[in-house]
């Protein structure tokens, strides 16, 4: 995230939880934003989330809360298709909202996991 000029920590462990900053569709290897339709961006965002969690020592199945930010509420059907692949059983609590994300992406998410 710092390569995007954002002054924040990607993951913070505290009191038995891992807090993950908003994860836009960024390629965690190159640091470049992933371009494409909303499904491509959702996939990249979830891969970035998984990468951040694993770097903090926590697997994806420990996520307990996700907040999805999307620029268009019409995207939620496509977002749900991809989301269901990552959280097929015992999905975390989730909220979604329409949000202007700037020039970077059409989707982002904020997450909390059990450490």
Image (tube, rainbow, N blue to C red):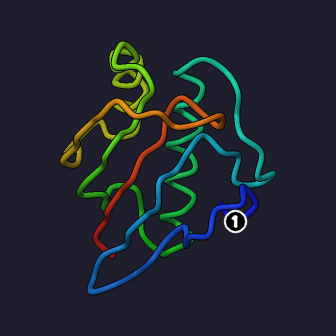
Q: Is residue 69 left or right of residue 43?
A: left
Q: Which residue is mark 1?
A: 2
**Above or below 52: residue 15:** below
Q: Quadrant of residue 14?
A: bottom left
Quadrant holding the C terminus: bottom left
Residue drawn at x 52%, y 37% is 101
Disc 1, SS:
helix
Q: Residue furthest bottom?
A: 15
Q: How many marks?
A: 1
Residue drawn at x 40%, y 39% is 86
How many other residues sit within 10 Å of disc 1, few (<14), some (14-19) or many (≥20)?
few
Front residue (pair 57, 7): 7
Q: Is residue 32 left or right of residue 61?
A: right
Q: Which x, y percent locates residue 9?
A: 55, 73
Q: Residue furthest right?
A: 30
Quadrant holding the N terminus: bottom right
């Amino acid at each position: 995230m710092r390569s995007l000029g954002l002054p924040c920590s990607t993951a913070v462990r505290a009191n038995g939880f891992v807090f993950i900053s908003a994860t836009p569709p960024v390629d965690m290897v190159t640091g470049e934003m992933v371009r494409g339709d909303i499904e491509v961006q959702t996939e990249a965002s979830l891969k970035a989330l998984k990468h951040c969690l694993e770097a903090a020592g926590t697997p994806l199945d420990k996520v307990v809360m996700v907040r999805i930010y999307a620029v268009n509420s019409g995207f939620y059907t496509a977002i749900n298709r991809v989301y269901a692949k990552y959280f097929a059983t015992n999905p975390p609590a989730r909220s979604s909202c329409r949000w202007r994300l700037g020039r970077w992406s059409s989707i982002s998410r904020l997450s909390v996991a059990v450490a």
